Image (cartoon, rainbow, N blue to C red):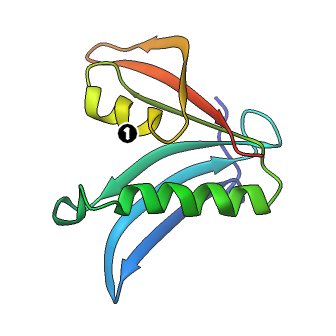
Amino acid sequence: MNHFPPSQKCNLGFFVGTQLVAYVEMVKAYPEDRCAIIGLLIVKKQHQGKGLGSQVVSLTLDNLRTEGFSEMYLSCSSTDSHARRFWANRGFVETGDVDEYDDISLVAMERSIS
């Protein structure tokens, strides 16, 4: 079994004032050195639909670009059309890869950030 070194895992909190309103969990330099994977994006319910998620994604991509990363990957539920549309509207395209698990199918998506 492999694990990621702590230096590759990154947790980002986004605040309005002192309130945490969004959170991103990602792994940098995986599966290749100039790639990153978003494992999780959470926006508090009362802040959804107001553009905050788009701002978080934009800031995250800008930060990764500044650090020299060129590709971003993620997976989302095959049955979550809202999430798939959200990511597609931010330049992510489905790769055609689908990971099947007992209770969920995950669609792989990617985009260039260079």
Tell me how many marks there are: 1
Quarter of the figure with residue 35? top right
The residue shown at (44%, 38%) is 89
**Residue linked to disc 1:** 86
The image shows residue 92 at horizontal and vertical percentages of 54, 33
- Rate crowding at label 1 as few (under 14), some (14 to 19) or many (20 or more) other CA atoms within 10 Å: few
- Determine whether the residue tagged by mark 1 lies in a helix, strand or loop: helix
The image shows residue 24 at horizontal and vertical percentages of 47, 57
Closer-to-camera residue (26/50)? 50
The residue shown at (41%, 21%) is 106
Residue 1 in the figure: left or right of residue 97:
right
Task: Decide: is 89 above or below 53.
Answer: above
Residue projecting furthest to the bottom: 17
The residue shown at (70%, 57%) is 64
Residue 77 in the figure: left or right of residue 32:
left
Quadrant including the N terminus: top right
Closer-to-camera residue (30/18)? 18
The image shows residue 60 at horizontal and vertical percentages of 58, 59
Residue 74 in the figure: left or right of residue 69:
left
Q: Amino acid at mark 1?
A: Phe
The image shows residue 48 at horizontal and vertical percentages of 24, 57
